[in-house]
Image (cartoon, helix red, strand yellow):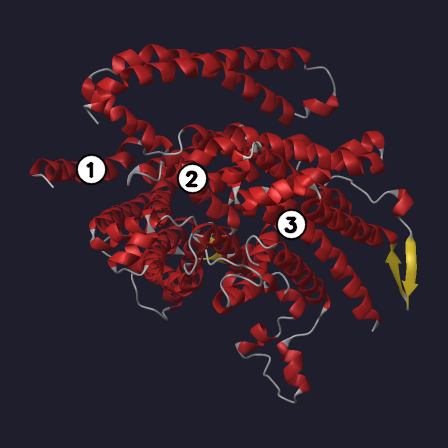
Amino acid sequence: MEFFLITLLNSLSYGLLLFMLSSGLTLIFSMMGVLNFAHASFYMLGAYFAYQTGLVFGFWPALFLAPILVGIVGAITERYGLRKVHQFGHVAELLFTFGLAYVIEEVVHLIWGRAPVDYRIPESLNFTLFTLFNTQYPAYRAFMMLVSIGMLISLFLVLTKTRIGMIVQASLTHPDMVQALGHNVPRVFMFVFAGGCALAGLAGVLGGNLFITEPGMAFAVGSIVFVVVVLGGMGSLVGAFIASLLIGSIQTFSVALDLSFLDLMIGLGVTIDPDSNWYGGLSITISQMAPVLPYLLMVLMLIVRPRGLMGTREG
Amino acid sequence: MSDALTKARLLLWGGAAFLFLLLPLVFSGGFSLSMLSQMGIMVIFALSYNMLLGQTGLLSFGHAVYFGLAAFVTAHAINFVEVGALGLPISLMPLVGGMTGLFFSLILGFVTTRRPGTPFAMISLGIAEMVAASALMFTTFFGGEGGIVTNRTAGGVNWGISYGPQIQVYYLIAVWCFVSMVLMFAITRTPLGRIANAVRDNPERAQFVGYNPTRVRWIMMSLAGFFAGIAGALATINYEIITAEALGLMASGNVVLMAFIGGIGQFWGPIIGAVLVTWLQSALSNFTQAWLLYFGLLFLLIILFSPGGISNLVTIHLPAWRAGVVKRLMPSYGYALLTGGLTLIGVIGVIELLYRGALFVGVHAVIPWIASGLMILIGGFFLRRAIRAVRQVWDDLSPELARWS
């Protein structure tokens, strides 16, 4: 019970973090039809910017500054990169963001080096919030959840209740009409891209110190975020939300489970000769399989339901 | 197809075969020989990748999966030969690799090609991640961190060929590379190749004509997997060791870069890309730690300014060449080259200064910083004007060129 509750809380906070990433990706995708391969790189930039600004101003200002900086980088990327490549078609756009991911990682190497940087949880949040049975629950994880949920609610309110949100939503489906009504749609695109990147940056600020801030973090998270988006259905925010929580809990639970098929078979009374060829394969535990599970789930989903959980279009 | 065209083509292929024969005689050093072998492998790999991206319009980020899996199976096959459990000459090992590539791309391709476009790109990435993650899980087959070691001389000496000396391996690679090139070119001329182009350009209409786009994509992907497998097997023979890195995301990304830098619009584009990128990787990495960054920047520049890659740069000049007006382009090109060179030196200066940790360490490098910054500013300012001048000349020439293109 204790294990279950704590792991559930952990997977919830991780899933919400994933959703912060995948919501930006989904927004950008449904608006521009571009899958931003560099999205996780903006997550990484968020963590590094937070580390750097945190050194000067402390954690709290960095919490606001870093996402804004990432948003500015995103805006520049859209204005001077993507908008230019747009005329060459989707493949060129995809490849542009792919190349950008490469370059951002190398720039991070260049400025901060290849080793992880010492980006830490702030002292003011480094305490135990409550003790559940025998496990202490850190306050920072709760804070992370709080910020994520706050972010989600405000994103939802902005998109559905404000004039800006109306224009953004209209631009998603009817860009020509919105343009005809006198709105600057390319600029709306730029702001959406910047906003999505800023969300990724915020996720980086929150996740960077909880996990680890190093140049490999973008690639590690990037493919998981893609799995989330495919699972949830491309372009669906609700789908991305469900898939984020699902993948979050699958990853968190599977890492913690030290069971294998062998244990199951022993439990059922079947004995396997340790010298047999199957022994090695069967003794793989769920925690060893953890890195593969999300992708396996994605492949299964593609076979059963190619458009994802909540997706509306086929391709 | 006119007679002259076929003759020119025969001449071209003959020239290529001659080049394969001749190159190791010119570049006979140990380093250049191993680089030539590597280039041959990468040429097959990049061409097989272009069967997907260039011909069928499938942007895959997981092509190294087939290369890598084939390389592992080949490594085990060679080890079987060594203990006498398998009687197959090393020269035919690429077939083992090819069949492995075909097998896996048939299975995985069935799942991935169900959706084209962006979803395909993401799914291929996911599959690549899955295979890479499994590689670290199944250590008996993939050898864990250390990989699988083989011995390419396992087959003994046949007709005086032992595959001990690198030159013999080079010629093995050259033969397979040439055969694969011819086959892959031939595929572009078959009805299948043409339909693949149709599926790339307009899947809906291809469907109206009566072809199933998903099946065409699947077939093309399987064939691409076959040739990637040949490349993977040759890599095993060449390096005698194969690690899980060979099927990772970096390897997959690398082949995307090769194909795109060379140009996906022309059959020979990826060949240029593979040769150039392989050369840059070994040459640049000797000089600077930042070579990957230069590489990424080159890639971005090509996407931004010449999305057809290097081969496209050549083909757009063909009409100008035939019209005999290349001379008139030269002054503006010289201007652009000069200013571009200046900017480039400035950028390299900044990057190298950063790599030496000059950003946080101190101000002892003020003069290089100022010099690089100035070069970027001045060079960049005039470069913009130079680009405008080049555009102007092209616009002026366009009425004349219209007759020649």
Residue B189 position within the rendered picture, expressed as x and y whole percent measured from the top left: 20, 48
Q: Is residue B39 left or right of residue B405?
A: right
Q: Is residue A132 above or below residue B321?
A: below
Q: Chain of mark 3?
A: A
- Tell me the distance, in whole angstroms, between the alpha carbons under discs 3 and 1: 56 Å
Q: Is residue B378 left or right of residue A23?
A: left
In the picture as drawn, the residue positioned furthest to the front comes out as: A181
Residue picked out by circle 3:
A23
Residue name at image x 79 percent, y 49 percent = A150
Residue name at image x 83 percent, y 38 percent = A59
**Quarter holding the C terminus of chain B?**
top left
Q: Chain of mark 1?
A: B
Closest to the observer: B98 or B38? B98
- Tell me the distance, in whole angstroms, between the alpha carbons under discs 3 and 2: 24 Å
Three-letter code, disc 1: Phe
Residue picked out by circle 2:
A89
Residue B212, quarter of picture: bottom left
**Earlier-in-chain disc, 3 versus 2:** 3
Residue picked out by circle 1:
B18
Q: Is residue B148 above or below residue A185?
A: below
Secondary element at tag 1: helix
**Quarter holding the N terminus of chain B?**
top left
Q: Is residue A130 left or right of residue B281?
A: right
Closest to the observer: A84 or B349? A84
